[in-house]
Amino acid sequence: MAEAVQAKNLRTMVRLRGVRKDYGTVAALQDTDLDVPTGEFLTLLGPSGSGKTTLLNMIAGMASPSQGEIIINGRDVTRLPAEKRGIGMVFQNYALMPHMTVFENIAFPLQIRKVPKAEIRRRVTDVLELVRLPHVADRKPKELSGGQQQRISIARCIVYKPDLILMDEPLGALDKKLREQMQLEIKRIHSELGITMLYVTHDQEEALNMSDRIMLMNAGRVEQLGTPHALYFEPRTQFAADFIGASTLLDAEIVDAGATPLLRLADGTNCRLRLDSNVSAGTAGKLLLRPEALRLVQDGNVPAGHNVLHGHVANTLVTGATSKHFVTVEGGAVIAVQELTNQNTARFDPSQRVCIVWPADVGRFLES
Ligand code: ADP
Ligand code: MG
């Protein structure tokens, strides 16, 4: 019995129970519960000031909670200093020591742990291989690019094989292309080593790219926790719908909550949708429409069973592989419709009436 309990605990790397942080009268983080399974890549996503760093710092031991318990790998570490928690940390500003070579920087945490010299050499060499920079061991950090420096700070963090790695906006200082490359790199390292990762970003694309699960934070509390798929396709709140992916939110009211539910938009248009929760007639909220789930057709070409909004194309933006039409609908709202760019992308002129169409199962109703 005791063994079964222990085995269960070992499958949870991080457990938070009622963890809270107040700064004076400001709750930087409200009471939070969380279980992170061993080996998971969990991303804390949210706007600036939503409490991501506060939460990460408490897990790291760099800030102490006002209330609650933090359990790492089955051990209560709430009152344990940072250096005794065995956690690796990677920051945005690399935090490499400028007067030391790359080799010395990575060797440093091993020297502190009194690892024998020959083993240090072997492990630093291995880890430089892992981050694909075997040739820079003798350079100083300033002789490396930003992306290379970040790889070295990741190498320094994984070299002593922590059970858990925390990263706070580690790619924030890099340009877009390098950032995407490093996202793949970090994912690769995560799957090769099987280390549990807690990753902070305010960039929704980065979170969608990298995570097993995303914890979306808003004003010091958890807005929604789930897989990238669930957050994208089943946002539970307007905040979640708005923060992740592009979205149009239209005022709407349920007029019939029956088998094929009916929704009325502010301009009087009725549309069908699928409801996956019990909502009663008369409930007010928003209809969420993702730009890529909509299509533009000419009057008379509306596919059977589709919802329709009439309007005209006010503007078309070709952004590369995809293009966005901004359609002003009757009633005045502007709705974005995204499609793959093709020869006919510029086929609409503003005087022409168009129909935005979508099948009933792609819209979502979000209660106010
Ligand atoms: P994020 O990392 O999501 O941008 P933070 O965790 O840094 O957010 O901050 C959450 C809230 O707590 C913010 O309102 C911030 O101003 C406040 N806060 C963070 N650290 C401190 C501090 N040391 N003293 C006072 N307020 C703080
Ligand atoms: Mg932060």
Image (spheres, rainbow, N blue to C red):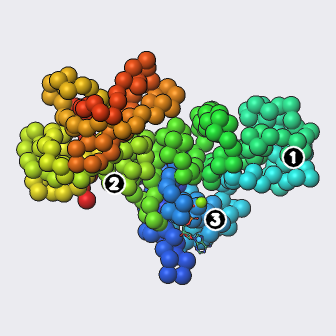
Which secondary structure lies at badge 2? helix
Task: Count neighbours of disc 1 (C-alpha within 10 A) and say few if under 14, some if 14 to 19, many if 20 or more.
Answer: some
Q: What amino acid type should be assigned to the residue bearing mark 1?
A: Lys
Residue 129 in percent (x, y) is at: 77, 31
Which label number is shown at residue 120? none
Quadrant in the rendering for residue 311: top left
Residue at coordinates 14% horizontally, 48% vertically from top-left? 268
Disc 2 versus disc 3: nearer the observer: 2
First in sequence: mark 1 vs mark 3: 3
Circles 2 and 3: CB distance less than 8 Å?
no
Residue 368 in percent (x, y) is at: 25, 59
For label 3, the residue is 61
Q: Is residue 216 left or right of residue 84?
A: left
Q: What amino acid type should be assigned to the residue bearing mark 3?
A: Gly
Disc 1 versus disc 2: nearer the observer: 2
First in sequence: mark 2 vs mark 3: 3
Task: Note whether residue 291 is visible.
Answer: no
Which secondary structure lies at badge 3? loop
Quadrant in the rendering for residue 123: top right
Which secondary structure lies at badge 1? helix
Circles 1 and 3: CB distance less than 8 Å?
no
Task: Count neighbours of disc 3 (C-alpha within 10 A) and say few if under 14, some if 14 to 19, many if 20 or more.
Answer: many
Residue 57 in percent (x, y) is at: 61, 63
Residue at coordinates 15% horizontally, 44% vertically from top-left? 269
For label 1, the residue is 142
Seen in the picture, residue 43 relative to 53 is either above or below; the reply is: above
For label 2, the residue is 238
Residue 16 in percent (x, y) is at: 48, 61
Whole-angstrom CA distance, mark 1 to mark 3, is: 29 Å
Seen in the picture, residue 21 relative to 149 is either above or below; the reply is: below
